[in-house]
Amino acid sequence: MEVIHLSYPLQDQLVAEIHPPTVTAIGNFDGVHKGHQAVIGAAKQLANEINAVHAVMSFTPHPRSVLKKQDDFTYLTPLPEKLTQFESLGVERAYIMKFDPSLAQLSKEDFVRSVLIPLGFKGITVGFNFTFGIKASGKPSDLAQLGEGYYTTRVVNPVQNNQYTFSSTQLRLSLAEGKMDHASQILGRNYQIAGRVVQGDQRGRLMGFPTANIALQEPYLIPRYGVYIVKVHGPFKAGYRYGIMNIGLRPTFNDPIPREQLEVHLFEFSGDLYGQELRVQFLHFLRAELKFDSVHALKQQIHSDQKEAMDWLLIHEN
């Protein structure tokens, strides 16, 4: 997949190089969930119809982090993860547009006139709730009207089940509540994070449950604090291992300065993982974070968590 980074104003030389004809899906696509996949799939279908390149245009950083000045904004799919998901969907070209105040101040007319038309798109697909231009003034109908004669516009209806529409907002809510089954339904895959294994304080090892401490390399959204059944991809013979992951502040230990910890205990594994990158898929939420009266009580609970996880895996992963 070809990745093209853009910023406003566009460079004339760069624009001249971006041919042949292209059909692009446009959106933030944070999560690349089933709703986003439908928009991207519609672009692929239109591209096949007119023999064009299948592309996606997305924005970085997320507009909310710029417009609301949220420096600590967390992502369902940080940019590297988003690009991986695009490629898995068969996208041939990804336009990554820098979102900054100069782009945010464009009127809906100027966004079409100064960005979309110069890029020479022959077709554009968007979701039903797509907005663009200053103060989100542009709607899909404006996109079609302003681009008439330049590109074909297709608007994709919402994707939903009998409870809710598949959206990034609903996905964030599901993760905040630890509802990993809902998250998987929205995504069409398990939610995952990635990071490198770093040195911890060895408390898990001393209790007989060695853990790999994960330091995130990208600003992933962290699910609800608690214990999860996970599938971990890394430098293993089979490519992955199952385990349980604890996310939280470890209140049992009364650390002077509590720090968020992501610790995974891998079943039937021993070895040195320091410095290795692990990708952790969340399969099931076991329980909320708890403070125990003693380390002994915590050890008993971990034994119970491990047994419950094994039983769950026998049913759901075989």
Image (spheres, rainbow, N blue to C red):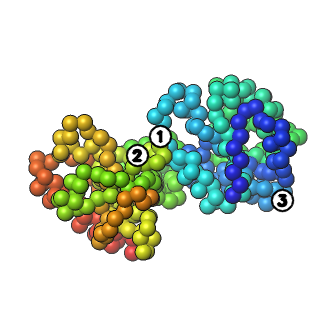
Q: Which label was assigned to residue 74?
A: 1
Residue 191, image x, y percentages: 46, 54
Which numbered disc flags the more N-terminal residue, 3 or 2? 3
Where is residue 85, by image quadrant?
bottom right
What is the three-letter code of the residue carrying label 1? Thr
Q: Which label was assigned to residue 51?
A: 3
Q: What element carries label 2?
A: loop
- Mark-to-mark CA distance, 3 and 2: 41 Å
Q: What element carries label 1?
A: loop
Q: Tell me whether circle 3 and circle 1 mark residues in contact (CB < 8 Å).
A: no
> 110 or 311: nearer the eye?
110
Q: Who's the residue at 36% across and 49% down the image? A: 178
Q: Tell me whether circle 1 and circle 2 mark residues in contact (CB < 8 Å).
A: yes
Figure quadrant of the C terminus: bottom left
Residue 167, image x, y percentages: 54, 45
What is the three-letter code of the residue carrying label 3? Asn
Q: Who's the residue at 11% across and 55% down the image? A: 296
Q: Who's the residue at 69% across and 30% down the image? A: 103
In the displayed structure, does residue 266 sit left or right of residue 103? left
Is 136 rendered above or below residue 281?
above
